Structure formats: structure tokens, C-alpha cells
Image (spheres, rainbow, N blue to C red):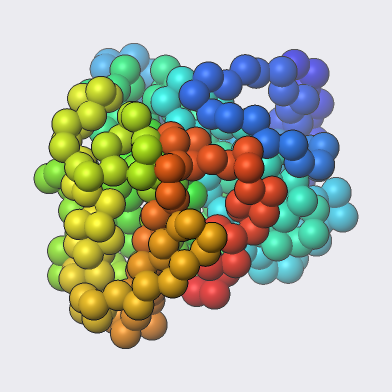
Amino acid sequence: MKMTTLIVLGFFLISCESSKNESDDISINTPEPVEDYSFYVQQTIEGVSQQREVLVHIPTNFNPNEKQSIVIAFHGNGGQNDMWVNRFSSFVNSGEFIGVYPQGHLKSWNLGTEASKANEVYFLEQIMKKLETYSFFNASKVYGIGYSNGSGLVNKLAIETSYFTAIAPLASQLIAGTVPSVSTAPVSVYQMCGTADPIIPYEGGKSVVGHTFLSGTDSALNWASAFGCSTIPKIETMGNDQIYIYKDCMSGKEIRFHSVHEGNHSLNQANVPDFYNRVWNFLKQF
């Protein structure tokens, strides 16, 4: 890893040319990375002080005085935060958003059965405190994307905090016992689940990862009910996929459940070149 210290926006950031490997996340061919820098959050985990990395992904012609949309993306279990750099380079370089990619402790996110025992809500709170010091930060345009274990985390964070405008939990439904309620701050949700996912059961129940999940449809309905949406969805088709859309929610939000026909745990991403365009086109409406 080659590291260069730069002064950006009045504080020091560390430029990283990463050679990390990812494990449970698939590779997507996207443009080469633009610029990525890091800051670190100090956190005590199981009695030991840890420095947790957060990558900040900005375009090369970045204007720090312009308010920007922020996408905070959470990798899967066993993955690395820099997996998002290639996937989101085209969006970042075209000025769609600034990418913020936290690193899970022990390459995981603590939902109860994982290797990490970190307080992830605290971690997000510290990330937000840092982001709030940046001149480009726009608090009304903060979005969360998670894959697999990171998807479970983005659900949890949306339920237990009020930072996100909209979220995209990819390849995970709600975990039983961690569900939104009428007191949850409303967010728009783009939930994607594969009907043939061998890791997170589409119909719900106990998973090999140790959690018990709601079914995909029950998960979407829980979000819709919590935010006062119409509980009778409009159903659209996209090829063999079905998309359940719950409208008329509080605060102008929307719940969208994309059921990927015969989708595996990767949601068949390798077969869908515009996969993240679909996700971002939904999020940026809010």
C-alpha cells in the first residue's frame, strides 16, 4: 500500500492505493478508482482500543465548497471497504455522490453472531461527527448501501439512528427482533433479495450465519407499516423479477422490494451491468 499525506479541506487525510482482497463480495468490472483518502475512528472493542478506517472517495476535480450527496457503503462479512471504490468510481467521478466506506472490525459487522463485537451505532455516530466538519457535507442527502452482513447493518442503523435519507439493503432482509416501529425515523428503502439465496433464506427463518430472518415480503411490509405506507403494494415486473412498491408513506418516503428471480446471494450482479445504476436512481429521488 503506497501512502501519501495530503492536506484536504483543512485536515490531513491519507491517500491509499489499496491491494486488499475481499472474500464474500463478487467483483464487478467498473472504471479505475479516482481519489480515495482515509480517516480513522478510535473505538474501544472488548477492552482494546482500535483504529477503524473509513475511506472517503472523491472525484479528482472535487470542489470542497459544493454540497454533495453522501453514500455510506458497508461491505459483506469477510470483505474490505475498498471493494466499493471500483464499483462506485463512475458515480463519484461524475459528481453523483461522495463515497464513504467504513471498515468492519475483523472484516465483519456486529449483528450478534459475527466475529466483531463492536458497537456499530457508536461507530456510525463518530463517522457522522467527522463528516459534519466537512464543507461539502449535506445532512439531507445521506444514503446507506449494504451488502449481505453490511445489508443487515444498514437495516439496523436505519432503525436505531436518524442519519439516512434512504437505504439500499442488498441481499438481506430484516433480522427478527430488529424491525422498525412507528417511532423509527422514516427512510426510503430499496430492498433486494434473491429467491434462490442459499445464505439468507428468501422465505425467512434460521440462516447459516446464525440469525433468524423475516421473509423478503414480510420485511418490506414491516418497513411499510412502520412508516404509514399503503400496505397493498403496486407490483411491477422487470424481466422475470418482481418489484413490490409501497407508496403514500410518511415524509414522502417509499418502500421498494425487488425480488430477484432465481437470484443467488450475489443477486446475480455479474449479469446486470447497470445493477448499481438502478439502486442509485432510486436513492437519489429522496
The residue under the point 54% across, 74% down is 285
Residue 101 placement: quadrant: top right
How many labels, in total?
A: 0
Residue 158, quarter of picture: bottom left
Q: Position of residue 173 (x, y in %)?
A: 29, 47
Q: Nearer the viewer, residue 272 or 156?
A: 272
The reply, left or right, for residue 244 in relation to residue 209 is right
Left or right of 148 on screen, residue 47: left
| Residue 134 appears left or right of 119 | right
Residue at x-position 49% and y-position 24%:
24
* Residue 67, x across and y down, in percent: 67, 68
Furthest-left residue in this view:
177
Position in image of residue 9 (x %, y %) = 73, 51
Q: Is residue 245 above or below residue 167?
A: below
Query: Would residue 197 be seen by someone viewing this image from the given angle?
Result: yes
Residue 229 in the image: above or below residue 154: below
Left or right: where 59 falls relative to 26: right
Is residue 174 in sight in this rendering? Answer: no
Q: Position of residue 154 (x, y in %)?
A: 38, 47
Residue drawn at (31%, 17%) of the image: 115
Judge whether 68 appears above or below 117 on screen.
below
In the depicted view, which residue is nearer to us: 91 or 265?
Answer: 265
The quarter of the picture where the N terminus appears is top right
The residue lying at 12 percent from left, 45 percent from top is 177
Q: Is residue 32 above or below residue 66?
A: above
- What residue occupies the far front of the structure in this picture? 240
